[in-house]
Amino acid sequence: MSKDIGMTSAAAPLDVADAKKVTYWRYGMLALITLVLTLSAGDRAALSVAGSTMTQELNISAVELGYLFSAFSWAYVIFQMPAGWLADKIGSKLAMGLAVATWSLVTILMGFAHYFPMVVLALLVMRFLLGVCESPVGPAGGRVIASWFPSSERGTAGAIFNSAQYLSLAIFTPFMGWLCHQYGWDSVFIVMGLIGLVVAVIWAKFYYLPVRHPKLPVEELEYIRAGEGLVDLETLGSKGQGQKKTSQWADIRQLFRNRMMVGIFLAQYCINAITWFYMSWFPIYLVKDRGLDILQAGFIAAIPALCGLIGGVSSGFVSDALLKKTGSLSIARKTPITIGLLLSASIMLCTLIDSAWLVVVVMSLAFFGKGFGSLGWAVVADTAPKRLIGTTGGVFGAIGNLSGIVTPVVIGYLLQSSGSFASALIYVGVHGLVAVFSYWVIVGKIQRMALD
């Protein structure tokens, strides 16, 4: 039965052990944002699956393909901070719903690219628009985690949310490979866009802020609130709470004056460089360097993705268990990050391997490590100033996705100059080592940042 849970702030403190036995509506909200990010990652990766066929049919060179991959990230980076600000202003529900609907329409439009004159330019514009429309996903997702989860569960929640990119590759890569093989590259974009429109309807119908959810029991609301979950996040700073009013750029300057935040942003840039190799060039690597056809590449690419999914989900449970045992956010977050990113650097070993199956094994280990070390969104939820959750998530996403601009283009040039992926794999692997350095040397203690 529906109830006005927004009036329960004066409720008596809830025993944590009892609260955890009541309900798990918060995980339903986590499932929604994970579904959205899964779709988002699938749509941005559609070009990597369709790319080998498109380049032949539309006469697109390796360097041009690199710029097409990069165009998405140019927009994603430019609009992450405005998207974070927008999510803080209009709320996660509206920001995310508009994002899913608009990027799905752009994805469908890409399926008709061959009807446009100057096809490469048309695709560049559409990839840029895709990045614009997807930019609210990270900031809005970070706000959902901060509002729906107590600090003791954010590691798990953040890891599950982040694992959507691996889930996407595991599910959508073979599916899109099959579509491309059976019906042509254009079907990949059209079908993925139609799926997105369905997801937009699901999001609009089922997502709520905790204090506005019509069926959330008071006990679970108070459990989240007691664990520092920002259950009324949409109203922070909007009802005369005496907070200092500053411009968005003034807030962003404060973030960049904080050493911990700078280290977190740098590490995310490096982690995303590894992600973007898998989301852009990996299927093409399997086709061009390892001699597989696109159908084989689609299914084989799912194996490392599944390993990344396992690593991504398990790291959250490990991190939260460490937090309960040690009481230290730094130990709880940095330990999985270090282990995972050191494993991710093993991708460089593929330059020494001739066997295709052994390459898949090493790639799977590296992708497991990348997933295990990707706790960035949990760290943002732990450290961002309370009234700047969306803005901090926007900056975090923007800096991280700068690597989406750089990495695909650099790999395109490395591939064109050398004719092989060896130097590209080394370039990608080194980023994992730099991310470990950043967390241990630059970040320091992980704690909530205070504003001036």
Image (cartoon, rainbow, N blue to C red):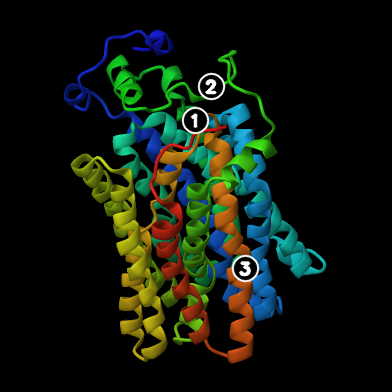
The image position of residue 167, as x and y in percent, is: 39, 56
Residue 208: image location, x then y, percent: 46, 25
Q: Residue at x 47, y 80 (%)?
A: 426
- Taking the view exactly as shown, the residue that stands out farthest to the right is 117
Task: Give the residue type that dot 1 points to.
Answer: Lys
Identity of the amino acid at label 2? Answer: Leu
SS at mark 2?
loop
Position of 90 relative to 103 (above/below)? above
Residue 25, compared with residue 219, is above or below; it is: below
For the question of whether residue 197 can be seen, the reply is: no
Choose mark 1 or mark 3, whichever is in front: 1
Viewport quadrant of the N terminus: top left
Q: Are there few (<14), some (14-19), or many (20+) residues within 10 Å of tag 2?
A: some
Give left or right: position of 369 versus 198: left
Label drawn at residue 386: 1
Q: Quadrant of residue 342?
A: bottom left
Q: Earlier in the sequence, mark 3 or mark 2?
A: 2
Name which of mark 1 and mark 2 comes first in the sequence. 2
Residue at the spot of label 2: 236
| Res. 344 image quadrant | bottom left
Residue 2, position as x, y percentages in the image: 38, 12
The foreground one among 297 and 440 is: 440
Mark number, residue 76: none
Q: Which residue is mark 3?
A: 406
Tell me the distance, in whole angstroms, between the alpha carbons under discs 1 and 2. Answer: 8 Å
Residue flagged by tag 3: what amino acid is it?
Answer: Val
Question: Is 54 rendered above or below residue 378?
Answer: below
The reply, left or right, for residue 143 in relation to residue 189 is left
Give neighbour class at mark 1: few <14, some 14-19, many 20+ (Cα, 10 Å): many
N-terminal-most mark, 1 or 3: 1
